[in-house]
């Protein structure tokens, strides 16, 4: 039932509104596409030429439509002259686009600058003179102009348009034959669209009215442009022509403007048409602004990404250099501390020992920054081999026991015997230093008093390493930043002045690279925390 009603609905619509809809669709399509092409690279001669072509196409489409909606003879005569005036520039802009495509810069030869361009100006001026359409010959019973007088000037106009179109297509075909693969496919799509467009225009806007006196399809001239727009758009999307960045936004803008223009179909009065056309133009201009804003945002995002990349490179370089200096300093202090240059006074020994510890701590902090950078870029490789997780966990705990004892913290480790053996295949050093030891070290640093309990067990085909402390705890806000690059808790720097914010980020990346997960649990500030690492047991 519905399928029968739809054709009846469209059959009952005034044909004048269908004409207007075709103009609206063509204007929206070529306008949005032309603007996006130009906005992506205004310096490109190809992009500028396509934009000029789109603007002239819009002008020609609108004038061509209006020409067949008015009945006043003098106005019709001048509108008809403007139709072929824009038709001249339409053919020339089409030729220019195909001539420069796909270059960013193009030096035009003397024949173009000194002969072709002046000739186009002459023909354009001729179209507005009485030498092509001198007067109106016949007016129908309805008051519409049905026939015009045609003078000799139509011949140079027609020859100029035909030569421009054929020359542009021939030049384009020669370029296409020099390409291969995807590039040739892109050329072929544009060529098909251009051929269809001009075939339709010549058939319905020249042959039918000129030979068969059928002018019914002339107002649909704008609709015949759509094949070129459609094939060019697909070539842009499929083969990345013009380096377009906001194609989705353009498509959505086009769909919105078309749906807005559908209201014109239901206009039954001149005032209704004017109102709906005005709404269409407002939506179209709004779509253009959205495209421009989206493009600007895209450019800012790319610039920000490039800036971040440069900053990361600089940080990586500086960190690498600083690490080298700190390592050398630590080597010197180690030699002094070990007596390689003779026995040191007691006061000096204490100073050198402290300097050695600070140098090593600084080198470790810089190493963490470098490690995080490499993990982010994906340049870190892991040496995977079988090892015992229990032995690794015990070693991590024992390395910080001295610090825990100085702070009078109770530090324990338990391994569930039921889970043995704890054999795991992975990078022993990375898991030991940057995962297990990092979690135990953090527990010691963020626990002013109380206890720390590390444990290892096997459960549901997973090895679970957990570190539970009675320290400062974690707020819900801090949890969001824990495992991020450089992420700090609200009071982490105050509690641990040496925190870089990269330790947990590194631990997370290494754990996930081994197929595991890491998480933190806490009942809140001042209520301690538990960090849990789960690694696959099989």
Image (cartoon, rainbow, N blue to C red):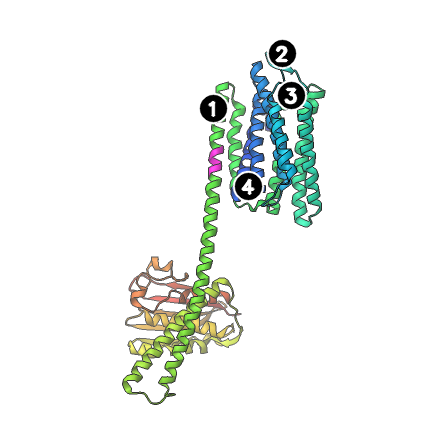
Range of residues picked out in magenta = 284-289
State the mark number for residue 275. Answer: 1
Foreground disc of the pair 2, 4: 4
In this rendering, is residue 186 above or below 159? below
- Residue 323 lies, in percent from the top left, at 42, 72
Q: Along the polypeptide, which appears first: circle 3 or circle 2?
A: 2
- In the rendered image, the residue lying farthest to the top is 141
- Dot 1 or dot 2: first in sequence order is 2
Q: Main secondary structure of the magenta part?
A: helix
Query: Considering the numbered disc 2 on the image, is that residue within a helix, a strand or a loop?
Result: loop
Mark 1, secondary structure of its residue:
helix
Q: Which residue is mark 3?
A: 216
Is 108 located above or below residue 274 in the figure? below
Q: Residue at x 40, y 72 (%)?
A: 364
Task: Check whether the beta carbons of the residues at disc 3 and disc 2 lie within 8 A of each other.
Answer: no
- The residue indicated by pointer 4 is 37
In this orientation, which residue lies closer to the viewer: 318 or 46? 46
Label 1–label 2 contact, CB within 8 A: no
Q: Secondary structure at mark 3?
A: loop
Q: CA distance from mark 4 to mark 3?
A: 34 Å
Q: Position of residue 309 (x, y in %)?
A: 47, 58
Give residue 53's quadrant in the image: top right
- Distance from disc 2 to disc 4, alpha carbons, whole Å, reads 44 Å
Q: Can you tell which of label 4 and label 3 is closer to the viewer?
A: 4
**How far apart, in angstroms, are the residues tagged by discs 1 and 2?**
29 Å
**Mark closer to the chain start, 4 or 1:** 4
């Amino acid at each position: 039932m519905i399928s029968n009603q739809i054709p009846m609905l469209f059959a009952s619509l005034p044909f004048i509104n269908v004409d207007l809809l075709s103009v609206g669709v063509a204007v929206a399509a070529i306008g949005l596409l032309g603007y996006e092409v130009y906005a992506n690279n205004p310096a490109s001669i190809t992009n500028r030429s396509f934009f000029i072509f789109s603007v002239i196409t819009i002008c020609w489409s609108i004038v061509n439509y209006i020409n067949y909606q008015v009945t006043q003879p003098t106005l019709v005569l001048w509108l008809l002259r403007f139709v072929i005036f824009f038709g001249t520039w339409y053919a020339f802009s089409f030729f220019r686009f195909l001539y420069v495509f796909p270059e960013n810069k193009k030096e035009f030869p003397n024949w173009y600058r000194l002969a072709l361009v002046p000739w186009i100006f002459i023909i354009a001026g001729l179209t507005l003179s009485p030498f092509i359409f001198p007067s109106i010959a016949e007016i129908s019973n309805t008051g519409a102009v049905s026939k015009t007088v045609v003078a000799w000037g139509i011949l140079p106009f027609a020859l100029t348009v035909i030569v421009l179109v054929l020359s542009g297509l021939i030049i384009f075909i020669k370029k296409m034959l020099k390409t291969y693969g995807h590039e040739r496919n892109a050329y072929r799509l544009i060529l098909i669209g251009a051929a269809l467009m001009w075939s339709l225009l010549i058939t319905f806007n020249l042959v039918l009215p000129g030979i068969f006196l059928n002018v019914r399809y002339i107002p649909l001239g704008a609709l015949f442009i759509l094949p070129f727009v459609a094939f060019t758009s697909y070539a842009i999307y499929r083969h990345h022509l013009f380096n377009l960045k906001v194609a989705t936004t353009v498509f959505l803008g086009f769909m919105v403007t078309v749906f807005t223009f559908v209201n014109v179909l239901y206009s039954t009065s001149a005032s209704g048409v004017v109102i709906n056309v005005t709404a269409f133009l407002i939506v179209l201009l709004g779509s253009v602004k959205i495209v421009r804003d989206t493009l600007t945002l895209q450019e800012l995002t790319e610039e920000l990404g490039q800036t971040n990349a440069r900053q990361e490179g600089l940080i990586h370089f500086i960190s690498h250099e600083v690490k080298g200096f700190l390592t050398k300093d630590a080597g010197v202090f180690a030699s002094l501390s070990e007596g390689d240059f003779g026995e040191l006074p007691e006061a000096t020994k204490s100073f050198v020992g402290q300097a050695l510890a600070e140098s090593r701590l600084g080198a470790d902090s810089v190493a963490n920054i470098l490690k995080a950078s490499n993990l982010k870029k994906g340049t870190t490789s892991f040496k995977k081999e079988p090892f015992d997780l229990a032995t690794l966990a015990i070693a991590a705990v024992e390395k910080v026991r001295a610090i825990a004892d100085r702070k009078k913290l109770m530090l324990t480790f338990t391994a569930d015997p039921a889970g043995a053996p704890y054999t795991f295949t992975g990078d022993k050093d990375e898991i030991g230093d940057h995962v297990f030891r990092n979690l135990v070290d953090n527990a010691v640093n963020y626990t002013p008093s109380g206890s720390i309990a590390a444990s290892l067990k096997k459960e549901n085909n997973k090895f679970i390493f957990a570190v539970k402390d009675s320290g400062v705890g974690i707020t819900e806000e801090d949890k969001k930043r824990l495992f991020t690059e450089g992420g700090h808790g609200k009071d982490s720097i105050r509690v641990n002045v040496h925190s870089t914010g990269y330790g947990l980020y590194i631990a997370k990346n290494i754990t996930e690279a081994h197929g595991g997960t890491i998480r933190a649990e806490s009942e809140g500030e001042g209520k301690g925390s538990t960090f849990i690492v789960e690694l696959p047991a099989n």
